[in-house]
Amino acid sequence: MATIKPSLARGTRDFGPDLMAKRKYIFGIIESVFRLYGYQPLETPAMESLQTLTGKYGEEGDRLIFKILNSGDYFKDVQAEQLEEAASSQSRSLTALISEKALRYDLTVPLARYVAMNRGQLNFPFKRYQIQPVWRADRPQKGRYREFYQCDVDVIGSASLFNEAELIAIYVTVFQKLGFKDFTVRINNRKFFAGLAKYIGLGTQVGRFVVTLDKLDKIGADAVEQEMLALGAQAKELGEVLELLQLKGYDALIQGLSEHVADAGVALGLDEMQQLFKHMEQLGLNQKYITFDLTLARGLDYYTGTIMEVVTHEAAMGSIGGGGRYDNLTGIFGVDGLTGVGVSFGAERILDVMEQLELFPSTVIQSSKILLFTFSENEMSYAMELLKALRTAGISAEWYAEGSKMKKAFTYAEGKHIPYLAILGEDEVKQQTISLKNIKTGEQISLGHIALLDLLKD
């Protein structure tokens, strides 16, 4: 058999012990905050039926769904003329014939499918969190992977804007606990877009308006203006809207929207934004982490009300979280009238930023608290007795079973970030003591069993 050079699929990566420890640290903090706010865990399958996923993320999102070929001879139901037609027209109609399943693109649509299938057994409002991987056939680049974890938290079956306020509070709480100092939760409302599009003469092209607006940070205001003019926007009104988009801060935007485009159908968005900020004030949220940003679009088609996104200013990275309100997403599965709102944490990007900023506590990558070292078989019984006592006390410990050279044991402890080395020789056995060496400082002391347990419990 030919030798195969080991490699990873593009857009994926391995997570060794240190990275896994850091990842679990992030997940642990996020999950603890989710549970603090009354959310329950849920898991859904890695793959869904293709028809469940398509048509929910917009045209661009549909292109990024990883399709799974049908098992066995996936071409058996395809006729020759269908192949020719697909090849000549570059049609995607062939996909439905050879692929019935796909890897999930996000956790929100599978949630809607789950709620629709289990609505009779659920307690509404249904508050769930989900920490699982998703897959997107995107172009790999810094901070963007084809396989990555999402940490989602959603409320289904409640229209109260208090839910949005609590989700923003969850964002602020989590990022503070993770050690972020300079981050912003950007907030907007999709209800503004229909009114703004109507005001500039693109009332029948709201979708194109949103897609173009979403490019503002990437291509700049001048290029966005040219694209909207090409769509048929009225120059004078477009200029007013672009000026409005430059306003910063809650008070300035509320006043600007009220004075200039209130008659264009943005009144409901204004009312919701004012209610949301009132709820956030009632929750005592620190406003320095929150901003009303009219340029925030978020491209997913299913958002209908409040939308939000988190960015950090401490590192060069895209958004590290986002979400919003989606009305009647379950309607596509035959269950009408269930509104929902949720947010997601970009775990991979958060990990990258925290590594860059060195935000992880030094103990996160520590595998065991202490490594036991013996010189010969004569100390084995004593070592095993101590090992049992340590583990019974809930202290992670291991014995170095690879020989009697202390230097190798020391190197092993360093490599696994074990802070202490317990040296057990003939004298220690006789005196029923432990010679304890601090791996980092090199300091060595002698102490008894009880003193050792007390030290390591701290």
Image (cartoon, rainbow, N blue to C red):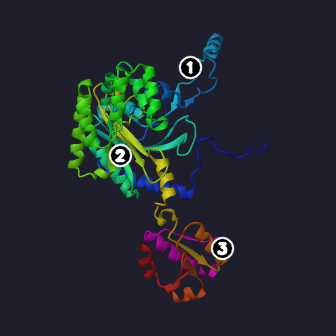
Q: Which corner quadrant holds the N terminus? A: top right
Residue 162 x %, y %:
24, 42
Q: Secondary structure at mark 2?
A: strand
* Disc 1 versus disc 2: nearer the observer: 2
Residue 457 x %, y %:
41, 73
- Label 3 packing within 10 angstroms: few (<14), some (14-19), many (20+): few
Q: Indicate the amino acid at tag 3.
A: Lys
Segment tinted magenta in the rendering: 377-402
Q: Quadrant of residue 406?
A: bottom right
Residue pointed to by mark 3 = 408
Q: Quadrant of residue 25?
A: bottom left
Q: Quadrant of residue 9?
A: top right
Disc 1 to disc 2, how far (Cα)?
38 Å
| Closest to the observer, 162 or 398 | 162
- Name the residue: 23% across, 32% down: 259
The count of marks equals 3
Residue 391 x %, y %:
47, 69
Give the farthest residue toward the top. Answer: 81
Q: Is residue 199 magenta?
A: no
Disc 3 to disc 2, how far (Cα)?
49 Å
Residue pointed to by mark 1 = 92
- Label 1 packing within 10 angstroms: few (<14), some (14-19), many (20+): few
Residue 410 falls left or right of residue 219: right
Seen in the picture, residue 382 relative to 34 is either above or below; the reply is below
Residue pointed to by mark 2 = 185
